[in-house]
Amino acid sequence: MAKENQSCGFNSQQDQHQQQDIEIKERLHHIKNKILVMSGKGGVGKSSVAAYLSVALAKKGFKVGLMDVDLHGPSIPRMLGLKGTIGPATQSGKAHPVKYLPNMEVISIEPLMGENKDMATIWRGPLKIGVIRQFIADIEWMDLDYMIIDAPPGTGDEPLTIAQTIPDASALIVTTPQEISLADVRKSINFCRQVNMEILGLVENMSGLKCPHCGEMIDIFKTRGGMLTAKKEGLKLLGSLPFEPEVVSSGDAGNMSFLDDDQLLITQEFNKIVDEVVKLTEAKEDLIPETQKDKELPMRKQASAGTKILTVPVSDGKLTSHFGHCEQFGFIETQNGNIIKTEMRSPPAHEPGVLPQWLYEQGTDVVIVGGMGQQAQQLLKEKGIEVIIGAPMDSPEFLANQYLSNTLMAGEQVCDH
């Protein structure tokens, strides 16, 4: 008799699980894009990026849900200054998420913890898995354009549950430039590949600090770490975000208003990341809200898959150290690691900021130079163009072949004056 009761209990649990599976699939059907924000280690600003991305998408007119599955260290509610609580159950028995904006909803474990927000969540894997599934199945989300999911660092129960429960989720991986962070990011990349999760790209956070006195960028950590990792792994670097003291204080105060301040470098850079995410996830025309259809997002001619354009400043058939005053630029079109064609083009008249914009418009992905000023480097980096400095003075094709074979040895910067 005891065995029969145990069997009945097991069957009941199995039925409940199957019913929840049905409810999860039904709810996910009403969410167009699901993005899991990951990081290999803590302290890289993953939750900040998840919060910024959600708010920025909502401000563009999209319907957004932000799901905080960092159950041991939920920080999303405090970053947003969220004061609301989970809404009462509806006739369907489902609760409402917390409203942050009219078109943005949030769910986190913190609003369920009562008055003691500092209470430790001491849960094992099965309980965490159950809560995450409930966040999807038992919450009355509105029909969403984007569901942004903030996972704890690493490759544990929470991201694995998301991968298994939301099989069409894509990953956005956050890192900082130093090697200790990049090493863990590579584990996150391998995790995504093992569970067949698409990777939208990498975001490099804390990539530098703009000096308030002279305006020059100060590289607090090593430089180009995110870009080099993205290149090596065949991924897209969505953008690099600098330190901004004002943003730190805003986050502590639960204030996201800095996203409206276009004078801040971090806001300018983050808006580019948001535009890139929209382009990458845009599968149907009707995903764009009516309010946005008459506003063209910054667009750039997209090269076909596997295509990359390398650009070299040239004089007398070889690389010249005078980037800003060269006779011509060699544009080497490559596809799948092979040179397709080389074309020489005359640059516009030399004026501050003109060449980086021109190279961007020409479709340049990589600039190989002997030397370059800091301002030009920063402008190119802002446009997502990789800059290799200190290359030897050889022909454009020779340098391109070295780059493609990963044997190009960049040395000390050659004077550009």
Image: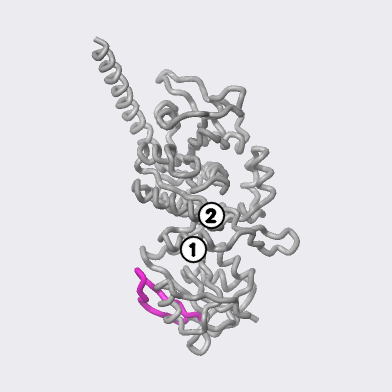
Q: Which mark is residue 155?
A: none
Q: Which residues are magenta?
A: 329-344
Q: Is residue 334 above or below residue 260?
A: below
Q: Tell me the mark number nearer the camera, choosing from 1 and 2.
A: 2
Instruction: Calculate the distance from the C-alpha at mark 1 to the C-alpha at mark 2.
Output: 14 Å
Q: Say above or below: 2 vs 194.
A: above
Task: Give the amino acid at mark 2.
Answer: Ile
What residue would you read off at disc 2?
Answer: 180
Q: What secondary structure is the magenta-colored segment mainly?
A: strand
Location of residue 246 in the rendering, given as x and y in whole percent from the top left corner: 69, 48
Q: Quadrant of residue 177?
A: bottom right
Residue 47 in picture, x, y percent from top left: 55, 42
Q: Quadrant of the C terminus?
A: bottom right
Amino acid tagged 1: Leu
Q: Is residue 60 visible?
A: no
Camera-nearest residue between 311 and 10: 10
Nearer-the-camera pick, 380 or 64: 380
Residue 338 is inside the magenta segment: yes
Task: Specify the color scheme.
Answer: one colour
Q: Report crowding for label 1: few under 14, some 14 to 19, many 20 or more residues within 10 A (C-alpha).
A: some
Residue most extreme to the bottom: 316
Q: What residue sits 49% from the left and 39% below the top?
A: 64
Residue ID for mark 1: 228
Quadrant where the N terminus sits is top left
The reply to whether the magenta stretch includes residue 348 is no
